Image (cartoon, helix red, strand yellow):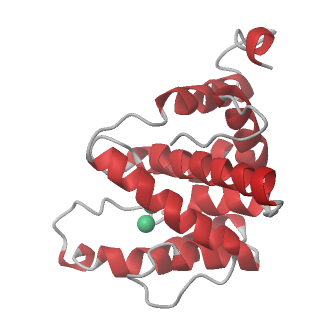
Amino acid sequence: MALSTSKQITEYKLAKDLFTRGKDIILSPEGQQMKKFTQHGTTSVFEHCVSVAKYSLLISYFLENRFHIKCDRTSLVRGALLHDYFLYDWHDPDPAHRIHGFTHPGIAMKNAERDFGLNDIERDIISKHMFPLTLVPPRYRESVIICLADKWCAICETFKIDISSYLIYRVNYRIGLASGEFTINREPETAKES
Ligand SMILES: [Fe+2]
Ligand SMILES: [Fe+2]
């Protein structure tokens, strides 16, 4: 999505902002479980949530730079990362998954509350992200942003349009650094992009 803002936002900076705000979730074994499940096409739930966090951040930068509308970006990122934290394979032909579209926001919210704790904005983001399917409209601007970003990402993933692979690579790179999997002193893109 080409959002032109007065300040240039690189994928590197987006990944850094996203990782900093969501690292408790991203680095936790619970959050990493989302890599085991497929969301749309060949995209994992983890990749989908990172992609939604990316576009939510982009929308929030745009709103702030153009209209001076501020968002709680940490709740935005945490809500994006946890909005599909339902932790099962919804493609499984289990009859319980037939109404996944209606039920998974509630399941994701319960799981996220149990594993990470949530504030009011994060609860609203997760429980209303399927609006209008879930009838009750979002209460906060952060929830509206996630609703839009989620639909955009779902469409692109379904039609195999690559919108986030570089950012996902950058986030995984940071996971590797934080877990000691990689041991270098400096990220190669830092010099040219920051
Ligand atoms: Fe969802
Ligand atoms: Fe989603």
Q: Which residue lies furthest to the bottom in this view?
A: 136
At 37% across and 54% down in the image, what residue appears?
154
- Image side of residue 83 versus residue 14, left or right: left
Q: How many labels does the image show?
A: 0
Counting from the top left corner in percent of width and height, residue 80 is at 59, 58
- Image side of residue 17 versus residue 46, left or right: right
Counting from the top left corner in percent of width and height, residue 167 is at 57, 31
Q: Dividing the image into four equal quarters, which quarter contains ligand 1? A: bottom left
Q: Is residue 12 above or below residue 60?
A: above
- Image side of residue 57 versus residue 39, left or right: right
At 72% across and 57% down in the image, what residue appears?
63
Query: Where, quadrant-wise, is the C terminus in this rendering?
Result: top right
At 57% across and 64% down in the image, what residue appears?
146
Q: Residue 112 sits in which quadrant?
A: bottom right
At 78% across and 63% down in the image, what residue appears?
71
Q: Residue 97 sits in which quadrant?
A: bottom left
Q: In this view of the protein, can residue 24 be seen by the observer? A: yes
Q: Is residue 175 above or below residue 180?
A: below
Front residue of 64/168: it is 64
Counting from the top left corner in percent of width and height, residue 110 is at 56, 77
- Image side of residue 25 versus residue 192, left or right: left
Front residue of 111/3: it is 3
Counting from the top left corner in percent of width and height, residue 10 is at 68, 28
Q: In this view, does 98 lie above or below 47?
A: below
Q: In this view of the protein, can residue 38 be seen by the observer? A: no
